[in-house]
Image (cartoon, rainbow, N blue to C red):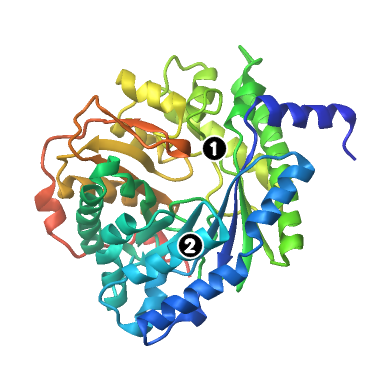
């Protein structure tokens, strides 16, 4: 039973500390939408999505009004489209993306994910067709998000796919140059992608999932920052305890919203993703949490250790609050979406190399990082390979969402607005990695993958 103090504390968290539910995401299986005719398959996709999610937005808004809990986004994830498109042998998968976009607009969601391919061990003809279609698909749609899984601890890293994705990212930036390469903000490349992630751009509905499912992603960097702001001089043990207790409360709210949405939509409850997801708003930053621990600027020495403490404490507190924690769950460090990260990058203290080190201990990887528009595709592929290697060896999810900014140089800024924020263009190493990427083939899985 909640007491008055706990109720008032939760109200304060919502009202003053930027606590919100970042997303309610409905996962929808499209396996039964496969068809030898592309047009017919696309109509099935549209019908399945619109009939499954017709009440998603309305129910989310009802819960917001009744409980006073902000729900920032309502989203949909679908079966990786390369699996659905395989039946038609389509050479161009853009019509599938257009059907997804049309359905998403009809039901009123903010984003739809699943224009995806899983190629960690090899690539089918349908996978290749979908990957080649990504730049045009992201130019022609507004709400569609795309992801490609190029490696895993079990399979190793598909370096042919790594090389191809560097080129795809560059082409996507070029085709959306009129929007500062915005298409790349809707494209993420994974190692060890998970099947129940509610966050974009990497959400897709895994083949082992139910027909439909509700997954919820919480937020709460502002709440954690406020909780530790009065702990000057406290030990790390005390900081960890405080963060755990705060994560518990945040996750309980996410569990409540997830179960209520599940009941009202008559869709099974999947997971709560308890990731600390920042926004560009002041007071809602993961970087500021790390600085509150005693760092003068995020990115200086000690940052990786501080992030490791934060990530671990969030997970420990969250798993006590829900038996269905999943997705990515931890702390996100997207540069453009975090006011503190933006400031640290502009100061030059936070670099891509330091961010790569931080990804060893956080939830995902190099996220929402703007680089000069003339960065070679091979350099982007090499950055991706480095990030995938961290995920593969450490048996964790890592990812790359990099934004080559057409016509921009180091020190310039790209503006994307909303939750995507703004990103200072950061320097990359000028030395070439092209011969390394040109080798192709596969980096073998580590020995510890053989656990059977």
At a point 13% along the width and 52% down the height, the residue shown is: 436
Between the residue at mark 1 and the residue at mark 2, the CA separation in whole angstroms equals 24 Å
The residue wearing badge 2 is 204
Image quadrant in which the N terminus is located: top right
Residue 95's x, y, as percent?
A: 35, 71
Residue 383, by quadrant, is top left
Residue at image point 28% right, 40% down:
180
Q: Is residue 442 visible?
A: no
Is tag 1's residue or tag 2's residue first in the polypeptide sequence?
Answer: 2
Disc ID at residue 390: none
Marker disc for residue 311: 1
The answer to whether 46 appears left or right of 65 in the picture is left
Q: Element at badge 1?
A: helix
Q: Nearer the viewer, residue 333 or 76?
A: 76
- Single out the residue that lies furthest toward the top: 233
Tell me which corner region of the image, top left, top right, bottom left or bottom right, holds residue 234: top right
């Amino acid at each position: 039973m909640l007491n008055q103090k706990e109720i008032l504390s939760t109200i304060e968290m919502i009202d003053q500390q930027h606590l919100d539910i970042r997303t309610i995401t409905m996962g929808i299986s499209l396996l039964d939408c496969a068809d030898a005719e592309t047009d017919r398959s696309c109509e099935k996709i549209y019908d399945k999505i619109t009939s499954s999610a017709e009440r998603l937005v309305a129910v989310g808004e009802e819960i917001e009004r009744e409980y006073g809990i902000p729900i920032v986004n309502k989203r949909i994830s679908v079966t990786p489209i390369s699996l659905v498109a395989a039946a038609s042998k389509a050479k161009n998968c853009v019509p599938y993306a257009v059907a997804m976009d049309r359905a998403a607009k009809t039901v009123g969601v903010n984003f739809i994910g699943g224009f995806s391919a899983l190629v960690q061990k090899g690539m089918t003809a349908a996978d290749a067709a979908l990957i080649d279609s990504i730049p045009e698909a992201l130019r022609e749609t507004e709400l569609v998000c795309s992801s490609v899984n190029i490696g895993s601890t079990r399979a190793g890293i598909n370096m042919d796919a790594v090389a191809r994705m560097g080129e795809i990212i560059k082409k996507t930036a070029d085709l959306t140059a009129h929007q500062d390469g915005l298409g790349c903000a809707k494209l993420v490349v994974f190692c060890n992608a998970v099947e129940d992630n509610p966050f974009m751009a990497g959400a897709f509905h895994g083949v082992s999932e139910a027909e439909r499912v509700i997954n919820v992603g919480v937020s709460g960097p502002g709440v954690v920052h406020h909780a530790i702001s009065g702990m000057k001089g406290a030990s790390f043990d005390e900081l960890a305890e405080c963060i755990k207790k705060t994560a518990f409360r945040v996750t309980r709210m996410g569990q409540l919203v997830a179960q209520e949405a599940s009941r009202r939509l008559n869709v099974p409850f999947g997971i709560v993703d308890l990731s600390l997801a920042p926004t560009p708003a002041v007071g809602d930053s993961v970087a500021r949490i790390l600085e509150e621990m005693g760092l003068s600027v995020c990115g200086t020495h000690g940052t990786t250790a501080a992030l490791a403490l934060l990530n671990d404490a969030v997970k420990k507190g969250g798993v006590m609050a829900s038996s269905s924690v999943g997705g990515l769950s931890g702390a996100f460090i997207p540069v453009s979406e975090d006011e503190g990260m933006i400031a640290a990058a502009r100061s030059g203290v936070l670099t891509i190399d330091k961010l790569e080190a931080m990804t060893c201990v956080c939830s995902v990887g190099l996220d929402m990082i703007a680089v000069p528009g003339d960065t070679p595709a091979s350099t982007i592929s090499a950055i991706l390979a480095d990030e995938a290697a961290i995920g593969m060896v450490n048996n964790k999810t890592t990812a790359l969402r990099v934004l080559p900014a057409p016509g921009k140089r180091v020190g310039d800024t790209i503006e994307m607005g909303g939750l995507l924020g703004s990103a200072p263009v950061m320097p990359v190493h000028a030395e070439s990695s092209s011969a390394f990427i040109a080798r192709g083939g596969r980096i073998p899985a580590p020995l510890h993958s053989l656990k059977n």
